[in-house]
Image: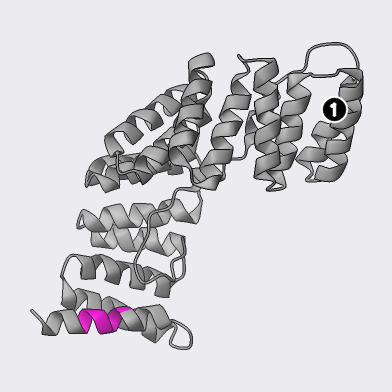
């Protein structure tokens, strides 16, 4: 999402939660190769993927068919955007240990990135059936349901994720987005406030907050939220979009004119929106 789009769009930053966040709970068992594995973990976390993969390969020579080492090779492949290789490695880990929940979660992540939402959903559910504590699976299920327009189910998944990980502002942001989709703006505002209280200060949460406040006709507060998401010109443009969508054309025109006055050299979007507002007013 960018504030330079003609219309405000909701942001779902939780899509970017990396699988690395889940790794401290995955501990290898079996003798041999521990130092090689630790070196691989450190290299992978630093983004040195080729060297990390080499260390895991060396560790596998000492612990053949170790599902966790194979799983970690899959994480390297996924980080390198080699999705098909990652799938093969995760599937192999599952074939060795059918109760290895993180591998199911990772298969779900691959399909999520490939845009194959039904396959992704199937694997996320398999993961939480084995390990109900995998909060990020619940979060991803919420994202899938929101994309499918099944917002009640999305809210249920986000709430389950929050029960497991209630200090994560991303989850409250995503919950708020679902409430916006359902036009439940007070609930959305409360969720965004909670995200901010938890020091989740990503500009996109303020954009979403501004949209919820604006749709709730709290325009001054919406403008303040938009200001925290971008420049004054961007904030005025976004407020204008709120007015335009509510057919409040006079206020929309005024906001777009302010945006252009503030940043005339490059703020093309506000000019386009201003034309739309003037045309819509003439057609009333």
Q: Position of residue 120 (x, y in %)?
A: 49, 35
Classify residue 280 as left or right of residue 233: left
Q: Quadrant of the C terminus?
A: bottom left
Give the mark count. Answer: 1
Classify residue 150 as left or right of residue 135: left
Q: In terms of depth relative to the viewer, which is nearer, 276 or 240? A: 276
> Which element type, helix, strand or loop, lies under badge 1?
helix
Find the magenta span and give its range.
273-278
Q: In terms of depth relative to the viewer, which is nearer, 148 or 266? A: 148
Q: Residue at x 46, y 70 (%)?
A: 231
Q: Residue at x 25, y 80 (%)?
A: 276
Crowd class of label 1 (few under 14; some 14 to 19; many from 20; radius 10 Å): some
Q: Is residue 194 magenta?
A: no
Which residue is label 1 attached to? 38
* Residue 201 seen in render: yes
The residue most toward the top is 30
The answer to whether residue 113 is above or below residue 137 is below
Q: Position of residue 182 (x, y in %)?
A: 24, 44
The residue most toward the left is 284
Q: In terms of depth relative to the viewer, which is nearer, 101 or 226? A: 101
Q: Position of residue 248 (x, y in %)?
A: 16, 71
Q: Residue at x 79, y 18 (%)?
A: 66
Q: Residue at x 40, y 32 (%)?
A: 158
* Residue 20 seen in render: no
């Amino acid at each position: 999402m960018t504030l330079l789009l003609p219309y405000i769009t909701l942001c779902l930053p939780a899509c970017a939660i990396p699988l690395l966040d889940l790794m401290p709970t995955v501990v290898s068992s079996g003798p041999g190769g521990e130092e090689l594995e630790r070196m691989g973990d450190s290299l992978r976390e630093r983004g040195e993927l080729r060297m990390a993969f080499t260390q895991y390969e060396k560790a596998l020579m000492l612990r053949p068919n170790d599902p966790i080492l194979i799983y970690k090779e899959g994480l390297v492949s996924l980080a390198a955007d080699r999705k098909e290789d990652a799938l093969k490695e995760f599937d192999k880990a599952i074939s060795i240990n059918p109760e290895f929940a993180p591998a199911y979660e990772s298969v779900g992540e691959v399909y999520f990135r490939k845009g194959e939402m039904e396959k992704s959903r199937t694997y996320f559910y398999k993961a939480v059936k084995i390990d109900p504590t995998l909060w990020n699976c619940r979060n991803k299920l919420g994202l899938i349901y929101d994309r499918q327009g099944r917002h009640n189910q999305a809210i249920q998944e986000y709430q389950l994720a929050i029960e497991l990980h209630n200090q994560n502002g991303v989850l409250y942001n995503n919950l708020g987005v679902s409430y916006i989709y359902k036009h439940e703006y007070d609930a959305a505002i409360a969720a965004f406030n909670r995200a901010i209280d938890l020091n989740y200060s990503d500009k996109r949460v303020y954009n979403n907050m501004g949209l919820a406040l604006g749709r709730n006709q709290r325009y001054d507060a919406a403008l303040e939220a938009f200001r925290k998401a971008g420049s004054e010109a961007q904030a005025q443009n976004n407020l204008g979009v709120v007015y335009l969508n509510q057919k409040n054309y006079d206020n929309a025109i005024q906001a777009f004119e302010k945006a252009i006055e503030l940043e005339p050299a490059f703020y093309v979007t506000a000019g386009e929106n201003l034309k739309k507002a003037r045309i819509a007013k003439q057609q009333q």
